[in-house]
Image (cartoon, rainbow, N blue to C red):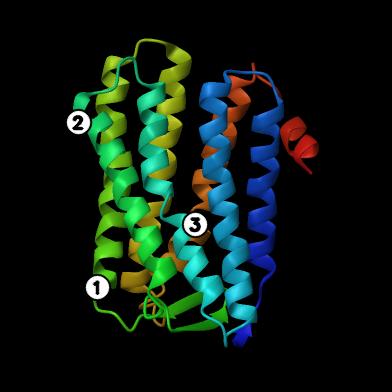
Amino acid sequence: MVGYFPALGVTTGLFELGVAAVALRGPGDPHLLRPTALLLVLLAGYQFLEVLACGSPGSAWPARLAFVDIVWLPPLGVWLIVLLAEPAAAWVRTAARQLFYAAAALAGWALLDPSFVTRTVCNVVLARYEHATPLYVLYGGFYQLGLGAMMLGAAPALAATRDPTRRQHLADVQMGTIAFVVPSLLTELLVPGTAGTMPSVMCHYALILAVFLARLVRREQHGVPLATIFRAGA
């Protein structure tokens, strides 16, 4: 571990858990708020597991569990779009189902294959994972495809949905996804020293998605002030 500072990961994770807790115990439609809360828990789980991975570089288990945790983000995000749409396009429903199957297979692979992550190198606030298996590209391809489905799947859902609140919810999911995916790609492409840190970069930028999900929670809970949400989740 070289000059790694866990404060950003811990703070981000606590914020995401706080909003998730409020989503679960407040008013609003539980069929929408529960998957939203689970998305936030997954984001927080990655943050804490990355901190553990950087604090125990001799063990690959925290890093492998981090990949098991975050692999569920794309299918759950697409499923949230399905729940919000009225109705969801057939291809979006199919994509959600197939992404869940693929995520289960990839999670099992990450757990069972010791070569999935062999070493974690951390610097400042980013982690770089070393993979002995060249098949890791399958995981990366799945993840990019899943995030693309989140961004593109919200478009037909917005077109089909007439309820103004659900349309705003869908816009939050779409804009939150775009707002963390695009900066992540630009960071790895343009910032020196970030090559190979995409999972870590994306999950730090995913704080932006968490903020948009907090907006969704506030709106669904009948206009509860955002400051009240954060105080209640503290």
- Is residue 151 in view from this perspective? no
For the point 56% across and 83% down, the residue is 59
How far apart are the alpha carbons under marks 2 and 3? 25 Å
Callout 1, which amino acid?
Answer: Leu
Residue 109 in the figure: left or right of residue 25:
left
40 versus 55 height, above or below? above
* Residue carrying label 1: 135
Residues marked 3 and 1 touching at CB (< 8 Å): no
Callout 2, which amino acid?
Answer: Trp
Residue lying at the far top in this picture: please name it: 162
Q: Relative to the observer, which residue lies in front, 99 or 32? A: 99
Callout 3, which amino acid?
Answer: Asp
Residues marked 2 and 3 touching at CB (< 8 Å): no
Residue 146 percent location from the top left of the image:
30, 48
* Residue carrying label 2: 91
For the point 46% across and 60% down, the residue is 68
How far apart are the alpha carbons under marks 3 and 1? 19 Å
